[in-house]
Amino acid sequence: MKLINNDYRVLDTYVKSKKEEAYLVEKVNQPGRVYFLKIIEPHKSNRCIQDFIENFQEYENIRHRYLLNSYEFGLIKNLNLKPISGRLYYVLSEYTDNHTLEALKGELSARDMAIVLAKIMEVLDYLHFRGFTYRALSPEKIYISADGDIRLLNISTLIEHLYENERINSIQEFIAPEIFCRDVIIDRKADYYSLGVLIKKYLYPLIVGDKTALPVIDSIVEEFIKKEPGSRNMLLIEARKKIEELFDFSIGTDYLKERDFLNLGSIKAIGHESQLLELEQLEDFIDSNSSLYNIALIEGNIGSGKTYLLRAFLRKAALRGGFTAEVSIAGGKP
């Protein structure tokens, strides 16, 4: 394979097996920067695809200096300039060739490890501020550069992993107990647990015998790995402060710059959920030839969100493989 959607030139095969297929690519019109492109087949990952159709815009708009970015989700329409039949999806995300924390185990000093943990706490705290719980923090999802900078695995790839039982089972020791329980609301406390296990496995061995550091770190771990989520009461910012003071460093966070913004790109059709559902149901009826109706008329005052609703519907319909077209008629009333 050399060309995907006439937009992406394949540079190398990252993985190709019966289970998954992914490539390193560059944009045809902007060569030089390497991206990670994963191909998703509906019969293998339908739940993940439905998740992306509903939520990818939100995932895409969660950006942080310590998080790899998610860029695009869409249909593959042609390969090597030839149209394809059937539905095939792709996800484009930021690529890094840095080593994972697991690969660097034993090579970091206690202070270096503490700095890594403080940076993880910063990005997790930001994700929680955005209403997102990472759920599956593990050493394989933490990338560390030669100068000690870190990046967490991007959200789109993380979401894929959350739908794959084999991947979750392989890191079960880092997963909060409530993740495996049904009818339990999962919140940021699940990430506290994962972080506690991470500290215990990767920082503990480096401070054995340190009578000053051990009690401080022990108090953090004890709080974070409690079985009941409601009992994990220490805040990330509090734990981070203790670690920074203990190892005498500060990574510095500009909370105003990081959080003082209005992210319009991730706003859903709030207030129009029922109308959007009706349009999607009409689409299903038309596809199955079981409806007497094949048109919907949407009325509303100027500024009531009609255009946003229609575009949200068209975007989802296109991702489901439907033919869509947008026609604007200027001039007000006909």
Image: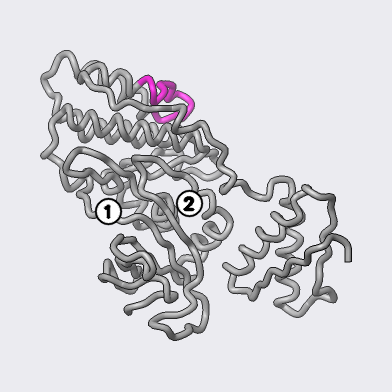
Per the rendered image, the range of residues in magenta is: 226-238
- The part of the image, by quadrant, that contains residue 284 is bottom right
Specify whether residue 237 is painted magenta. yes
Give neighbour class at mark 2: few <14, some 14-19, many 20+ (Cα, 10 Å).
some
Q: Nearer the viewer, residue 317 or 196?
A: 317
Q: Residue 194: percent from the left, percent from the top?
A: 35, 37
The kind of secondary structure element at disc 1 is loop
- Spatial CA span between label 1 and label 2: 17 Å
Q: In this view, does 234 lie above or below 93?
A: above
Which residue sits at x=40%, y=27%? 254
Left or right: where does residue 304 sit relative to residue 36?
Answer: right
Q: Residue furthest front?
A: 331
Which residue sits at x=29%, y=27%? 251
Q: Which residue lies furthest to the top in this view?
A: 212
Q: Residue 92: percent from the left, percent from the top?
A: 41, 61
Give the residue type at disc 1: Thr
Which residue sits at x=52%, y=80%? 86
Give the residue type at disc 2: Glu
Q: Name the residue under label 2.
A: 60
Q: In this view, does 150 lie above or below 77?
A: above
Which residue sits at x=49%, y=41%? 132
The kind of secondary structure element at disc 2 is helix
Q: Is residue 207 above or below residue 322?
A: above
- The part of the image, by quadrant, that contains residue 313 is bottom right
Q: Which of 58 and 7 is in front in this view?
A: 7
First in residue order: circle 1 vs circle 2: 2
Q: Residue 168: percent from the left, percent from the top?
A: 36, 51
Count of marks placed on residues:
2
Q: Name the residue under label 1.
A: 96
